[in-house]
Image: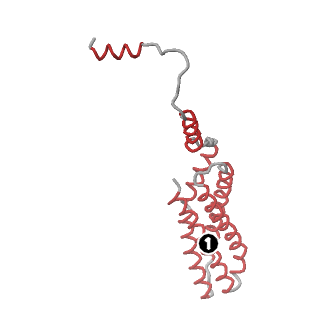
């Protein structure tokens, strides 16, 4: 062993003398003040994050909701084109029955799509109510989509009047296009900002 190693072993193996220890004057007060300031500022009680458990059904509903949302924009485009053609034919006085049927069929498809997405979306919103991640985004999306649901219900109710005169048809169109715009904004928001 080298001299340095012998010194370290000797220091470490030397017993500490028993008996009272004498600290410098004022040392214990300074030590108490230092430990008080450390505990008051450096140790902040922290809440432990709660784990959020989602059921398997949540993920199944989420996948249905997500896949169904991809059909939304093509159905909007088809309904808009059919509605514009129908309005043009209404102005000429000869709307075709096939065009009316197509417009109604696509509207029913949109109704089915929004029913599925409303049920799956509200159910998952309820299950995720304790999850703070993206809460504001989920709530804004939900309000926008429920507003669009209400708009589409109103558009459907005003659709019968659209057959009678052109001002009712324009009113129906305004409600429908506004609802489509709101739903598109709500859907795009989730596609773009949800991680």
| Residue drawn at 57 percent across, 59 percent down | 69
Q: Position of residue 45 (x, y in %)?
A: 61, 42
Q: Which residue is mark 1?
A: 103
| Residue drawn at 71 percent across, 76 percent down | 158
Rendered view: 34 above or below 168: above
Q: Along the horizontal axis of the image, is 2 left or right of 98?
A: left
Front-lying residue, 101 or 128: 128
Q: Is residue 27 visible?
A: yes
Determine crowd level at label 1: few under 14, some 14-19, many 20+ residues with C-alpha closer than 10 A. Answer: many
Front-lying residue, 173 or 101: 173
Residue 47 lies in quadrant: top right
| Residue drawn at 55 percent across, 54 percent down | 67
Q: Along the horizontal axis of the image, is 59 left or right of 119?
A: left
Q: Position of residue 137 (x, y in %)?
A: 59, 59
- Quadrant of the rendering where the N terminus is positioned: top left
Q: Is residue 52 visible?
A: no
Rendered view: 144 above or below 44: below
| Dot 1: element | helix
Q: Position of residue 92 (x, y in %)?
A: 60, 88
Q: Position of residue 60 (x, y in %)?
A: 60, 46
**Residue at the left extreme?**
2
Residue 79 lies in quadrant: bottom right
């Amino acid at each position: 062993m080298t001299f340095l190693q012998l010194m370290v072993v000797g220091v470490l193996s030397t017993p500490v003398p028993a008996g009272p220890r004498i600290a410098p004057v004022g040392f214990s007060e300074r030590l108490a003040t230092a430990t008080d300031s450390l505990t008051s500022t450096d140790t902040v009680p922290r809440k432990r994050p709660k784990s959020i458990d989602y059921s398997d059904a949540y993920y199944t509903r989420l996948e249905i909701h997500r896949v169904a949302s991809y059909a939304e924009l093509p159905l909007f485009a088809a309904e808009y084109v059919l509605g514009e053609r129908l309005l043009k034919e209404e102005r000429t006085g000869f709307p075709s029955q096939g065009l009316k049927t197509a417009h109604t069929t696509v509207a029913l498809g949109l109704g089915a799509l929004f029913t599925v997405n409303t049920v799956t979306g509200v159910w998952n919103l309820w299950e995720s109510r304790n999850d703070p991640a993206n809460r504001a985004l989920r709530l804004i999306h939900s309000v926008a989509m429920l507003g669009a649901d209400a708009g589409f219900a109103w558009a459907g109710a005003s659709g019968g009047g659209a057959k009678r005169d052109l001002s009712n048809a324009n009113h129906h169109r305004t409600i429908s296009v506004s609802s489509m715009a709101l739903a598109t904004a709500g859907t795009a928001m989730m596609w773009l900002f949800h991680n």
